[in-house]
Image: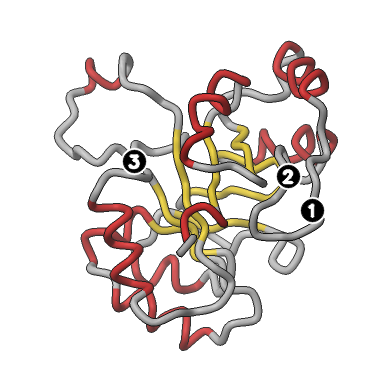
Amino acid sequence: MLRSICSNNDVLPEQMSVQKMFKTIVITKPSFFVGEAKAIVGLLDRGDIDMLHLRKPGAARDDVERLIREIPREWHNRLVVHDHFSLAERYGLYGIHLNSRFPTPPYNWRGSVSRSCHSFEEVTEWKSRCDYVSLSPVFDSISKHGYASAFTAGEIAQAVADGMIDDKVYALGGVTFSRLAEVKDMGFGGAMILGDAWKG
């Protein structure tokens, strides 16, 4: 079951049922940059997002670990790694995100598991085996030029009607903070933002 990631850790159980369950996640830039840890903390501290995915394809384990160590421990339970899964257990991170490079979770991992999906078939295959999955690209990508939406509005609406897209499926690709309400109205359980989070 997906754990609570509300910014208020003192929410009473009876309040949880009426809280908005839509989740907002930001994914890091693929490369490191000066002041990145401070920027990540700012997003979390302001309540702009529920979780932060650390995605650094090809990065050395030591470099990913250095970034995690620069983020105060109080935020570690809001972080998800896409690589070097052993760091998730070592630092008590929220979860791991499976992908084509790392398709299976480590033995005995008990935290959250999510996965990237790029088709409805993949969503069907993986949704029941993960706490949540991403579906992309839902809109034309901001960070990847020429990476256009793979789904029509009608196809997404039908997938929602069929129960394929639900609160465990998060929209990725071209999602911006200004489109969060639109993504929620489409029937997704959350949104994952990359390009829009790191503009400027």
Distance from disc 2 to disc 1, alpha carbons, whole Å, reads 6 Å
- What residue is rendered at 22% in x and 15% in y? 14
**Corner quadrant of residue 138:** top right
Q: Is the residue marked by circle 2 packed among few (<14), some (14-19), or many (20+) residues within 10 Å?
A: some
Residue 100 image position (x, y, % from top left): 76, 62
| Label 2 or label 1, whichever comes before in sequence order | 2
Tag 2–tag 3 contact (CB < 8 Å)? no
In the rendered image, residue 12, in percent from the top left (x then y), is placed at: 17, 24
Q: Residue furthest top?
A: 161
- The residue labelled by disc 2 is 140
Looking at the rendered structure, the kind of residue marked 1 is Tyr
Check disc 3 and report the residue beneath it: 5
Name the N-terminal-most of marks 2 and 3: 3
Q: Disc 2 vs disc 1: Cβ atoms closer than 8 Å?
A: yes
Circle 1 sits on which residue?
147
**Marks 3 and 1 in Cβ contact (< 8 Å):** no
The tally of labels here is 3
Q: Along the horizontal axis of the image, is 189 left or right of 156?
A: left
**Rendered view: 32 above or below 182:** below
Q: Nearer the viewer, mark 2 or mark 3?
A: 2
* Residue type for callout 3: Ile
| Element type where label 1 sits in the image | loop
